[in-house]
Amino acid sequence: KSIGEVSINMNPRVRGLSLSTTLLKDATHSFNAKNPLNQLIANIDKKNKASIKIFKSVGFLLQKSEKNINTYRMKFEQS
């Protein structure tokens, strides 16, 4: 199995427009369609509460916590 890494960095002009959740959801669905037995991880600064909220809302779960970084994982179930 391979593991992909995903991150989001929105242009400041479009932050707050609720686009991140939609884009992340679409990207994870597209990844899963092309790589059905894989997983994605996201390394997020513990202070970045907005990103943590977005990733958790899409289905990422906390995998580990080290110093200033939390690692979240989305594992795709076999259909």
Image: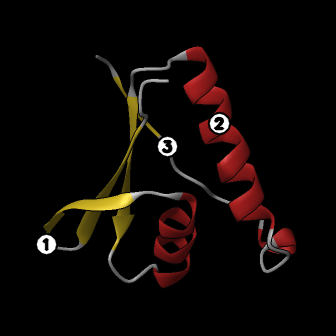
Q: What residue do we see at 71% from left, 62% from top?
A: 20
Helix, strand or loop at mark 2: helix
Residue topped by disc 1: 67
Q: Quadrant of residue 46?
A: bottom left
Is 32 above or below relative to 58?
above
N-term mark: 3 or 2: 3
Count the marks: how many?
Answer: 3
The amino acid type, in three-letter code, at marker 2 is His
Q: Of 38 and 52, which appears nearest the observer?
A: 38
Tell me the mark number nearer the camera, choosing from 3 and 1.
Answer: 3
Q: Identify the mark nearer the N-term, 3 or 1.
A: 3
Q: Percent x, y for residue 61?
A: 34, 60
Q: Quadrant of residue 37?
A: top left
Instruction: Select label 1 or label 2 by which is in front.
Output: 2
Disc 3: which residue: 6
Per the model, the C-alpha gap separating discs 1 and 2 is 30 Å
Q: Are marks 3 and 2 in contact (CB under 8 Å)?
A: no
> Where is residue 56 shown, x and y percent of the image?
47, 67
Q: Is residue 41 left or right of residue 65?
A: right
Dot 3 alpha-carbon crowd within 10 angstroms: few under 14, some 14 to 19, many 20 or more? some
Amino acid type, callout 3: Val
Q: Earlier in the sequence, mark 1 or mark 2?
A: 2
The residue sitting at 38% across, 64% down in the picture is 44
Report the disc number at residue 29: 2
55 is higher (above) or lower (below) than 13: above
